Amino acid sequence: MSIRCPVCGGLQIGKVGSEQYYCWNCFLEFNFNKGGVNLFEVAEDGTLLAMEKPAQML
């Protein structure tokens, strides 16, 4: 089973940590938590900035 990006639906996903994934289309990191999705933008210094769900996910 392939993991799809929860934002764009793409399959260009890399695993960057334990249950943490990166979409090469959206340039976002995400993980799944209790049936939901946590989205993160990667800052220039490499820190993760929590994001609200994009409009296309609503």
Image (cartoon, helix red, strand yellow):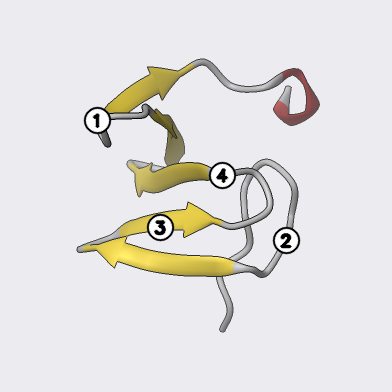
Q: Quick one: label 4 or label 1, which is nearer the N terminus?
A: 4
Where does the image place residue 53, in percent across and percent down from the top left?
A: 59, 22
- The quadrant of the picture occupied by the C terminus is top right
Residue 54, by quadrant, is top right
- Name the residue carrying label 4: 27
Residue at the spot 45% in from the left edge and 37% down from the top edge: 36
Residue type highlighted by circle 4 = Phe
Q: Label 3, label 1: how many angstroms apart (C-alpha)?
A: 14 Å
- Name the residue carrying label 3: 21
- Name the residue carrying label 2: 10
Where does the image place residue 51, in percent across and percent down from the top left?
A: 46, 19
Q: Give the label on residue 47, or none.
A: 1
Q: Are marks 4 and 1 in contact (CB under 8 Å)?
A: no
Mark in the foreground, 3 or 1: 1
35 over 10 or under it: above or below: above
Q: Are marks 2 and 1 in contact (CB under 8 Å)?
A: no
